[in-house]
């Protein structure tokens, strides 16, 4: 074996090791986020009545975006929905999953920060293009005029989101 071939195998082996370490890191961090989302769900259920709506919403708004997505997915799983994760799950400006309940499909979009007009319009357009209804989940209040323009979107905002969790 020549010197160049040995170097090539060393580099190739190193790349495989680096890729495997990266894959394990993603798997472990994903597992931790899912576990944290479950903890938040059970915290909300157990402390909702004692701390009140405003404090519960503040608690949810302080979690990071990916944990918020996992919280939403966990809630829908608990409700009996079948979940199909979108390929563009890690993009912030897109729906992140499709949920199926009684053979009807819905798109999911969640935002735990300030909701802009662009967020609602883009999600409504996405639902219209796919000819599906969608759940727009938010901790922030949404302007009623924006809701009226989005006939194919079900809004779970603010206290309605908490009521959805409790039922």
Image (tube, helix red, strand yellow):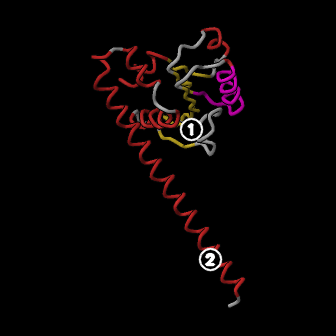
State yes or no: residue 119 in magenta: yes
User: How far is disc 2 from disc 1 in space, using C-alphas?
Assistant: 40 Å
> Which of the image's four quarters has the C terminus?
top left
> Which of the image's four quarters has the N terminus?
bottom right
Q: Residue sitting at 38 percent across and 35 percent down? A: 78
Q: Is residue 112 left or right of residue 92?
A: left
Depth check: give the residue in front, 81 or 29. 29
Q: Which residue range is magenta in the image?
A: 118-134
Depth check: give the residue in front, 29 or 89. 29
Q: Quadrant of residue 14?
A: bottom right
Depth check: give the residue in front, 133 or 74. 74
Q: Residue sitting at 63 percent across and 22 percent down? A: 152
Q: Quadrant of residue 3?
A: bottom right
Q: Residue sitting at 43 percent across and 19 percent down? A: 58
Q: State the residue lying farthest toward the front.
A: 3
Q: Secondary structure at mark 1?
A: strand
* Residue carrying label 1: 97
* Residue carrying label 2: 10
Measured as percent of width and height from the top left, residue 21 is found at 52, 61
């Amino acid at each position: 074996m020549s010197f160049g071939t040995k170097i090539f195998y060393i580099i190739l082996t190193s790349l495989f090791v680096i890729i495997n370490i990266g894959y394990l890191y993603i798997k472990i961090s994903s597992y931790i986020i899912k576990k944290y989302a479950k903890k938040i769900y059970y915290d909300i259920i157990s402390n909702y009545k004692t701390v009140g709506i405003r404090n519960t919403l503040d608690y949810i708004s302080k979690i990071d975006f990916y944990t918020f997505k996992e919280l939403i997915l966990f809630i829908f799983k608990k409700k009996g929905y079948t979940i199909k994760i979108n390929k563009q799950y890690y993009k912030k400006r897109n729906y992140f999953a499709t949920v199926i309940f009684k053979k009807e499909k819905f798109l999911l979009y969640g935002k735990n920060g300030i909701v802009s007009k662009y967020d609602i319009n883009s999600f409504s357009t996405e639902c219209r293009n796919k000819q599906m209804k969608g759940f727009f989940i938010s901790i922030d209040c949404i302007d009623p005029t924006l809701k009226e323009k989005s006939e194919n979107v079900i809004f779970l905002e603010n206290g309605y989101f908490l009521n959805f969790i409790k039922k």
